[in-house]
Amino acid sequence: MQSKLLKDISSRTVQVVLNQVLGLFVFMLVSRFLDKDVYGEMNWSFSFLTFITTILSLRIEQVVVRNVAAGKDASKMLTLYGAHILFSGLFFYLVLIAGSFLFPSFFKQHNLLLLIGISHLLSFFTSPYKQVANGREAYGWLALMSTISIIVRSLWIIGIVIFSSLNIQQLILVYIITSMVELVVCVYLMRYRIKIQLDLSSTIAQYIDLLRECMPQMGIVFLNVCIGKLDIILLGFFSTRIITAEYSFAYKIFQLLPFPLLIIGPVLVTRFSSYFSKNGKEAFLDRKQEIDRLIRIEMIIGTIFPLAMNLVWSPLIDACTGNKYGASNELTFLLLSICIPIQYLINLFWTIHFSMDHLSLIFRITAITCIIIVIGDLTVIPLMNAQGAAIVYLIAISVQYCIYVRHSGFASSETSVMSLLICLGASFVSGLLVHWLHISILLKSGIALAIYVILIIYGKQLRKSDWVYLRQLALQ
């Protein structure tokens, strides 16, 4: 079991690291060569499209992964979810086209929306194939499905930068073609490698049953997408494209930084779904030691990467982007990076409750978080722009975590509080101690990280038993 877990995590690691590294590379190239005005509009369009398509998905993918992992018919899940994505996606794009005739002034202001929408729609169509592969734990094929687009996109953009000059028209063409390549690869791998085909005997009644199964979390879909995208969308309305560009840059790095969560998160969903399909809460409570260890490891990972990034932020980002997004974003990124370890814990509690089908609890907690985001953004963004959006997000995520702790009823919830406070405190202290040193950034970072490690060992967050456990896991 442990060797299988390690193999799954390794496959996910290859996929996520490759995606994140190449994605960051493309992201930096685009931010450097596009004007802030165009870059801000492009990011606003992606945020708006993601907002809508996430709602349209109804988060059926989460139920599909859970059902396939629990042993339900994968072909039927692929067919029902695929049909939903196809028809809802096409309907949405037709509405966009109609809107361009009915509201020409809006689409003149957001002139990239329709073209970027083509690429986004093609990527939307790949979701059923990836989620079924995830539920089947076919992580090797899933890695190929998820990386082919960014590999081709990176090589193409490098070629453009070397042999000509990058502009928004070329970039949109690259996104459309690479999204089409991704879709073709997903269809091929699902049919001929994972060997799951569409079940043409699927009926509308079965689709309705799937919707009923998803119904308790349909409200959660809208709430979650508000939490993740509303700040950028509102910045597009209440501020300038340049401010939107700066915040969306910091937010993108913030999203890329917790890449280990992208590795372990989907694996935990399938593991917990399979576990709770055979065991109850009482059996889970007996595994407190394992959950405590997972929490401590996640807190170390969730604070050490933000610490390192904050130490090098201004000189590194300004060097990579031609002095566009470094110093101007320093405070915004610091505020957002504090959210990262909290997100690790929220993801763990969410996964446990989702696997136990506690959707009503998830809905209530998400609703409170969303209300804070909406009221806070509408109030603070017009006054404080990007920094205001970051402050509201930090407050909302902190409240969400506190409510999960209060209502979870797991002994490990208390461990999560202490581990979060100790690791966050260690990162703040180590960062502050070196902040005023007039030495090279590499030496400053090395000293800060050494102080951080000493502090978490002293705080008993890193223990000898952890090294023994990880070494045993690696040898199996």
Image: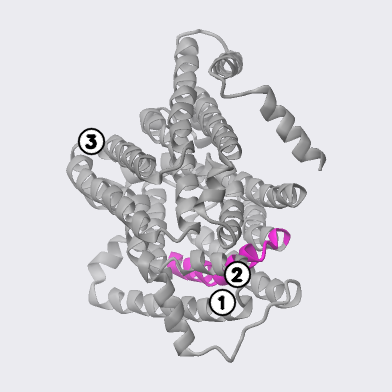
Main SS type for the magenta part? helix
Quick one: label 1 or label 2, which is nearer the N terminus?
A: 2
Residue segment shown in magenta: 116-140
Q: Residue at x 51, y 22 (%)?
A: 311
User: What is the distance, in whole Å, between disc 1 and disc 2 at their CAs?
Assistant: 7 Å
Residue 23 coordinates in the image, percent (x, y): 58, 49
Query: Which quadrant would residue 394 be assigned to in this image?
Result: top left
Left or right of 13, for residue 131: left
Circles 1 and 2: CB atoms closer than 8 Å: yes
Q: Which residue is mark 2?
A: 68
Residue 141 in the image: above or below residue 81: above
User: What is the distance, in whole Å, between disc 1 and disc 3 at their CAs?
Assistant: 46 Å
Residue 75 coordinates in the image, percent (x, y): 62, 79
Q: Which residue is mark 3?
A: 384
Q: In the displayed image of the protein, which residue is found farthest to the front? A: 282
Q: Which residue is mark 1?
A: 77
Quick one: label 1 or label 3, which is nearer the N terminus?
A: 1
